[in-house]
Image: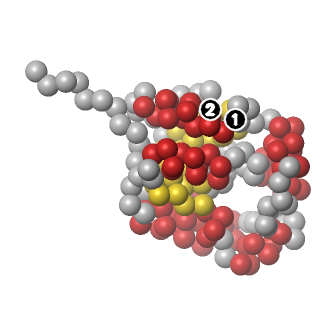
């Protein structure tokens, strides 16, 4: 008798969320633990987007469209396993990524506004000033019930968060698993 099939970790993960949520840190750690390729969507912003954000201006959909196309293309072209760190704040942005990578699973590190502000106070990002946080929080659309993925809280240290993410992914089909 054959053993029951074991659940496998999804091969294409997106760590999404607002600035200060730890997308890049968690994405790098996940990629390291999974032996995966890591892509940081921030690296794919055109210079015009970087300048706009650095000046304190939020991006609009016209700014994001070519960037999201580049992100989706890089994500689709990378050999699995692959982990992408990308804000993907709105459902339509996540859908754009899913058009290129239908089996993408989204992990959303989330925290309170005060915790995010505290974390941002301790860092200096090349082109994302902390004053853009409120706009990102206003733009953020939570994962919906039909989206493969789940939220994680950003309170614990990054290694513990990654342990929890890997445990949840190993549980099986990544639906809306909650916190």
Q: Quadrant of the C terminus?
A: top right
Residue 104 visible in image: no
Q: In the picture, residue 42 is in which quadrant? A: bottom right
Residue receiving disc 1: 157
Q: Nearer the viewer, residue 65 or 80?
A: 80
The answer to whether residue 131 is left or right of residue 174 is right
Residue 158 visible in image: yes
Is residue 78 placed above or below 89 in the rendered structure?
Answer: below
Q: Quadrant of the N terminus?
A: top left
Label 1 neighbourhood size at 10 Å, few (<14), some (14-19), many (20+)?
few
Q: Position of residue 169 (x, y in %)?
A: 46, 34
Q: Position of residue 88 (x, y in %)?
A: 62, 53
Is residue 24 placed above or below 159 in the rendered structure?
Answer: below
Q: Nearer the viewer, residue 151 or 99?
A: 151
Is residue 141 placed above or below 37 in the rendered structure?
Answer: above
Q: In the picture, residue 106 is in which quadrant? A: top right
Question: What color scheme is it?
Answer: secondary structure
Residue most toward the left? 1
Name the residue: 75% across, 72% down: 50
Label 2 to label 1: alpha-carbon separation: 6 Å
Name the residue: 51% across, 49% down: 32
Q: Position of residue 166 (x, y in %)?
A: 50, 35
Instruction: Report the number of numbered marks.
Output: 2
Name the residue: 82% across, 45% down: 119
Label 2 neighbourhood size at 10 Å, few (<14), some (14-19), many (20+)?
few
Element on which disc 2 rests:
helix
Is residue 4 placed above or below 44 in the rendered structure?
Answer: above
Q: Which mark is residue 160?
A: 2
Element on which disc 1 rests:
loop
Residue most toward the bottom? 47
């Amino acid at each position: 008798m054959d053993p029951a099939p074991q659940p496998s970790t999804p091969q294409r993960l997106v760590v999404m969320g607002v600035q200060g949520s730890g997308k890049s840190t968690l994405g790098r750690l996940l990629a390291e633990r999974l032996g995966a390729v890591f892509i940081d969507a921030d690296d794919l912003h055109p210079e015009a987007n970087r300048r706009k954000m650095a000046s304190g201006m939020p991006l609009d959909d016209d700014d994001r469209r070519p960037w999201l196309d580049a992100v989706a293309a890089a994500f689709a072209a990378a050999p699995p396993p692959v982990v992408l760190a990308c804000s993907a704040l709105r459902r339509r942005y996540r859908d754009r990524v899913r058009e290129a990578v239908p089996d993408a699973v989204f992990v959303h590190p989330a925290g309170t506004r005060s915790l995010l502000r505290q974390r941002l106070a301790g860092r200096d990002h090349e082109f994302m000033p902390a004053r853009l946080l409120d706009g990102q929080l206003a733009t953020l659309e939570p994962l919906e019930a039909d989206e493969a993925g789940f939220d994680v809280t950003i309170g614990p240290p990054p290694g513990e968060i990654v342990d929890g993410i890997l445990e949840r992914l190993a549980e099986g089909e990544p639906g809306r698993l909650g916190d």
